Every structure is written in structure tokens, then in C-alpha cells.
Image (spheres, rainbow, N blue to C red):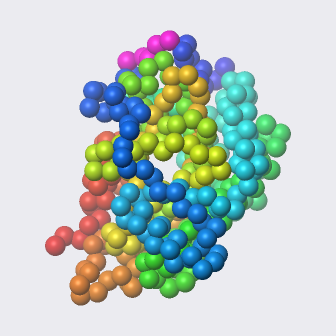
Amino acid sequence: MNSTIEKFVSSWSDGKTVPENYVFPTGQRPAEHLYPKSKISVPLIDLGKANGPDRSEVVRQIMDASQNLGAFQVINHGVSIELMDNARDMFKEFFNLPAEEKAKYCSWDTKQKFILYTSNFGYDQEKLHFWRDAVTQRCAPLEECTPYWPDKPAKYREIVGEYTTKAGEVGLKLLDLIGEGLGVEPGYFENDLTKEVEMNVNHYPACPDPTLTLGAGLHSDRSMITILMQGDVSGLQFNKDGEWIAVDPVPNVLCVNIGYLMQIVSNGKLRSGDHRAVTNSEVTRESAALFLTPTKECLIQPAKALINAQTPQLFRPLHYHEFLAAHNAGRKAKLSPDQVLKPFLIKP
């Protein structure tokens, strides 16, 4: 058996103990906030109404949610229940494959089009590990990426490929609506700002004590926008002014996260959604996050239409590869989402 696969939570967990290198310090672990009962909820928006006379109201709801929380949920988004269920089945079947079959995909080389890893990139340098195994796969251009995806389960490439296409279409539709709300020209995001599409599939095995560990720590996404499909188990939580807000899984709903890059392009008008993932003591959970991101050389800067005498430019221009370097360094240093963006602020 490949030695790397032996490090995976699903390979060694006995369902009874949490090793010390998975136990987070008191101030970081979920503890009593594992299942928060916040009075705030993640807004649920009917995307189907954007095609009719209520379009302006849908834009308003999206903008409000993106300004206040950096996240919202959508129904009637155009991805069928059947396709979502089939994609979830593919993810579960893949992670349930024999270790020997999965081992050939184990890698921390982010240049590859499909990699399987545990906890996070840079596992060997971590002092504390996250309670998750994960896949990162490139999704665009689809025909160039799918040959590198697994051939088992048999329909993985077909079904997951269809899902990423449909979810990507939802993302572009939402970006059109966000563009309307910001007041930028039509098609503003249909270029190098969203040309790269990548998906993380997270597998969170059942954890003996979810109050001690995390599936993913507090972070914001390195995307323009993220389209997330949860499983049927609660685990995603957003942070609003220090208060945790749980996202209960609802059938056929997609959760949308505003990424760091949208915060920059919107000149701070929209905020990135700060979130984390907790584990469950009884069942395993999967989620799939589709990231719409720029090309490495793409120049990212606040939209000129948003800059005027009353609203000065908050962020300096930067290339996406520069942001990625700062984002990765910030993750290793355990910086807060605000601290990650700080180097790109224009000093007053």
C-alpha cells in the first residue's frame, strides 16, 4: 500500500479516538459552537425569478447577502436533483474505493489535473491536521481535464463532468446578476477573470469527538465565486462578526460563497464569505466546491466603474499568481481572512 494513503483519515480512523495532532487549541475548536443556534440564517434566493419581472428583486437579494454575509443559497438554479444526486453518488463511490485503487491519485502537486490528498496541501509541514480527505480536480477545458480523472467509478467522468458544466453555468448566471447589482458593463466577468474552473471534493469521515477537531478551518475562498453542493449532513458554517451560522442542508440547494477576488473587484462593496467545516460523530459527509477563478496572469483590480471622488480605490492592481502566493502563505501562517487581503490594500 502506498505510504501516503496510510495518512488519510479514512485509512486509519478507528472511530473511537482523535489523535493529538488533530485536536485544535481551545480557542479554535468548535466546542460548544459545534451546532450554533444563531438568529441569523443564510439567505435562500429563488434564482428562477431572475428570468421574469422579479429580476431586480433577485439582484437586490443577492447584493444584500453578498454585502452582509458573503454567502447565500439558491433554489431553482437549473441543476436537476437527479444530476446532483448522481454526482454525490460518484463522490461517495470514489472515496469508498479500495485504498490500492485510490493510492495512484495521491499527490500534493497542484499542477496535476486530479489529485487526492489529506488534510491540506503541505501535510508534512502541518502541526495540526484537518479531519478530511479531499480531491482537487481541474475542470476547464473539460475535454482536456476528464482523461486525467478517475476511470472508477465507471461513470465518474461522465456524471461529474456534466455536473461541473451545469454548476459553472449557474456561477456565470450569478456573476451576471452581481454585475448588474454593482453597475459594471454586461459580460464584465466573462473573460480571464473566470476562465479557470476547479473543484474541491471534500470527504469528512465520521469523527469520534467533533468538538475537538475541524474539517476545515476559518477561511475565505481564493475564487471570484464558489458554487458549493453540500451533502445531506450539516457541517458548513459561516462567520458573521464572530458569530457562527450553520447552513442546514436542503435538498436541491446550492450554496454560493463570495470569494476574495470579488471583494477586490467590487472595491470592498461585497465581502468574502468567511466559513469553516465541522465534522459529525455519526456519519461521513461529502461536499463539492466549484471555484470560478482567473488565469494565473490575469490582472485583478477594482472595476473602474466603482471608483470616483466619493469612493476611492481600496485595492491595488495585482496578478492572480501574486494573490495565490499570498493566500498560500497566509494559510500556512494561520492568518485571518482580513489579514490575507491586507497587503493589497492601498494605504491612505
Instruction: Identify the magenta region.
Output: 16-20
Q: Quadrant of residue 51?
A: bottom right
Q: Quadrant of residue 151?
A: top right
| Image location (x, y in percent) of residue 156 | 77, 43
Which image quarter holds the C terminus? bottom left
As drawn, 26 above or below 186: above
| Image location (x, y in percent) of residue 302 | 37, 76
| Image location (x, y in percent) of residue 281 | 51, 22
Q: Is residue 17 magenta?
A: yes
161 relative to 33 in the view: left or right:
right
Q: Is residue 28 visible?
A: yes
Q: Is residue 319 visible?
A: no
17 relative to 284 in the view: left or right:
left
At 39% across and 45% down in the image, what residue appears? 245
Q: Quadrant of residue 190?
A: bottom right
At 57% across and 39% down in the image, what residue appears? 202
Pick out the residue farthest to the bottom.
309
Which image quarter holds the N terminus? top right
At 60% across and 80% down in the image, what residue appears? 53
